[in-house]
Amino acid sequence: MLVSVYCKDVRDSAEPRQSKLSEHLRHVEAIEDKIKVAGPIVGPDGKEPVGSLLILEVDSPDEADEMLKADPYYQAGVWQEINVQEFKGVVGSWVGGKTW
């Protein structure tokens, strides 16, 4: 199943994000086979991250939760809110056009 994951950063997350970046990237590499697309959401300045967005292919939302809880950003308190929802990709170049 595909799930969308939206992680909203706490205010002033720049320092913990930077200090945990190397560990976070190692974690991402370890789960890369489950990631369809992922990256930071940037704020109005177009540079500073204010959250993260992921589309994961997992067996269940619980598997996504486990992967997120193992992330150094989660453990460092970078994210104040995490929303995991099942996702249905139905149109776009990523899904090969449209599915209807």
Image: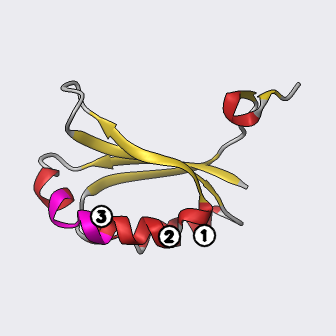
- Mark nearer the N terminus (3 vs 1): 1
Determine contact: label 2, label 1, CB under 8 Å: yes
**What residue type is disc 2 on?**
Met
Q: Is residue 74 at least partly visible in the picture?
A: no
Give the image location of residue 27, x and y in percent: 41, 71
- Mark nearer the N terminus (3 vs 2): 2
Q: Determine crowd level at label 3: few under 14, some 14-19, many 20+ residues with C-alpha closer than 10 A.
A: many
- Residue at 33% x, 66% y is 24
- Residue at 71% x, 66% y is 59
Q: Which residue is mark 1?
A: 63
Residue 100, above or below 83: above
Question: Which SS type dominates the magenta stretch?
Answer: helix
Q: Which mark is residue 7?
A: none
C-alpha gap between disc 3 and disc 1: 17 Å
**What residue type is disc 3 on?**
Tyr
Q: Which mark is residue 73?
A: 3
Q: Which residues are magenta?
A: 18-23
Colour setting:
secondary structure
